[in-house]
Image (cartoon, grey):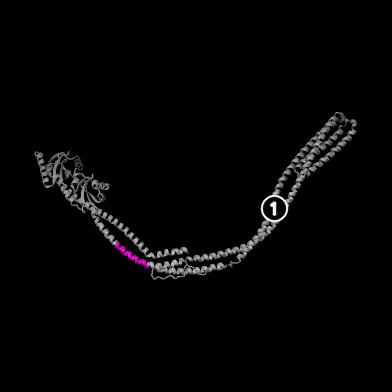
Amino acid sequence: MTGKRGDAPARRGIRRSLNGKILSNTTFNILILVIVSSVIMALSMQSLANNILLDSLQPMARQAAKTVEANIHMLADRMMTIALDPRMTGEGQSSGLESAAVEASRREVLEESAEIYEVYAIALYDLDGRLVQGIDGAPESLEGDFLALLKETDNLTTDPSTIYQDKLGIRMGMPVKGEEGTVLYVVGIYKYDLLNDVISSINLGKSGMAYMVNREGIVTGHPDQSLALGGSTLAQLSDGNKEAVERVTTGETGAVEFPVGGEQMLAAFSPIRGTQWSLVIQIPKSDYSHFINGAMLVSFTATLAVLLVSILLVLRLARSISRPVKGVTERMVALSNGDLHTQVRSVRTGDELELMTRTLDATLESMNRYISDIQQVLTQVAEGDLRTGPRVDYKGDFVLIRGSLQTITESMNETLLGFRDAADRLTDMAEQLSGQSVQLHQASLEQNQSAEELVSEVTHVKDQLADVKESSSQTRSQTEEITQRIRNANEQMAALSSAMDDISANAQQITKIAKDIEDIAFQTNLLALNASVEAAHAGEAGSGFAVVANEVKQLADKSAKAAQSATRMVNNTKTIIQNGVVLTADTADSLRAISGVSAQISTISDQLAQAVEGQESALTVMEARIDNISAIADRNLQNAGATEQSSGSLAKEAEALQSHVRKFVLKEK
């Protein structure tokens, strides 16, 4: 609000200076337009004047060149008359008098021409350019360039140079034809006055002039004859303008502008046919500048007058615009300060200003109506009624506001409906989560108990394996003792073999005993196989080893019975003990076999002990893993308790969300 109040004086200053702004801006624009137009007009008039002058000078140059050309043709006709005179060739004269008569006739022609025509000199020359006959101090020979030109053209020829004995003159030559062709050249030097009259008569402007130059760019004729006599060049007269020199010396017809000594010159040029000269008309541009400057001054004065009238009209127009705009501006300032009720002062101008005031009034009315409707909708929304909506017909781009209000209420309604449904679902989920938490807690308890039981079972198995390991150690020690006793028996049998020289008579009985012993050995081998198989499948605390131990016991019983039978037989065969040597040897072999079986049983016991140690290591690893499972079960039990508490809190939050959503009156779908 402070910033807006601070801007009010600036706005009032803007309103107060509206007339001045319109007037100053319009005046400035008109002034710029006048200046630009004046500059463009001046440049255009200068360019137009140059083009007009150059375009008008070209036909003047052509016409002047034709005048000079006509005079040159007149002189040429005179030369042709002289050259075609029959007296020049001596036609009609007798042969005896040919030389003297012809010479006299030729002199007569030359003298008549000198009297009739304005010439400095006239003479006849042979084909090598030597003087044959002449008057008035004719030169003794022709210049090489002029002679070569005569021979090349073999017709009327004009010398490009106009200097003759420090005077200006026009030298022309014409071949004199005989029966066999050209016999002589008649050459006349006409006085320069014939051309000077034409050149001097061409006066343009205050200081315009005409002059002639040849193809080499040397001045051959000029009102100031000293320039022609001094050998001045076109480059000097044009201040070194290459374009002018090139176009004139090539025999072109045209016009060009170039500066000479800081002053612009306009020049037109045209070739003089029948000669190697070109006529140049040169005029200072300043001779016509005062006409252009006067026209520009008149135009500028008229423009200033129009500018003053335009400023007065603009001032009147600015006042007619600023007053209605001032009222509209004041109303817009009030609108920017939040005033929507002050009426707009009507304007009866019949133009866009009246339309603007009416439009502003209609805009304020529409804005009041729209704001009231928006206020009503927002008030009902604030009270929790989301079934409301816009009730005013919005127009134009304000339709977007109506659509936005409808979109907002519908979006809020849908959002709160979604909140309500979500709260219901959240309550159901909280109840389900609570039941699942109880089940999870119970399952965690059972898992923890199972883990403890598994630990106790593993401990029990380890104890049994320890017993099996101890039994295996005892079996191994007993097997080693049996092996030692068998070794002792072998030693005793060796001692006995020396005393049983007479046992050969009872060989058959001893053989039966030996067969029994072999059966025992066979069963012992089977026992060893079963023991190895049971050791490989050692399972429940060495139960297989108990079976092996039982079989070994039975085998020991059989061995005892066989020993008893052998004792009885020994008692029965004392008489035939002499023949017991063979039986003693066989018995020694059987004992050695039993010793091998004992060694195998010892190996089986070692393997069983190793298997028990492997099972014990596996149970140790299993016990560690069971400890980890037990720890995880403890954490699950704790998490289950926390989840049960969180589900209770979630249920409370869901009930709170439902209570908040029920405060709104929603539009059911």
Q: Quadrant of residue 593 in the image? A: top right
Q: Looking at the picture, does residue 261 appear above or below residue 503?
A: below
Residue designated by label 1: 634
Using the rendered view, name the quadrant where residue 106 is placed.
Answer: top left
Q: Is residue 411 magenta?
A: no
Start and end of the magenta stretch?
Answer: 304-320
Label 1 amino acid? Asp
Q: Position of residue 211 (x, y in %)?
A: 20, 49
Judge by depth and name the residue closer to the eye, 583 or 645. Answer: 645
In the rendered structure, the answer to whether residue 403 lies left or right of residue 288 reads right
Indicate left or right for 106 with 484 as reference: left
Q: Residues within 10 Å of mark 1 (few under 14, many from 20)?
A: some
The quarter of the picture where residue 91 lies is top left
Please identify the quadrant where the C terminus is shown. bottom right
Q: Is residue 21 above or below residue 131?
A: below
On the question of residue 429 being in view, the answer is no
Q: Nearer the viewer, residue 276 or 367?
A: 367
Q: Answer whether residue 206 is visible to the viewer in this image.
A: yes
Q: Secondary structure at mark 1?
A: helix
Relative image position of residue 604 (x, y in whole percent) = 77, 39
At horizontal 27% and vertical 47% (from top left) the residue drawn is 243
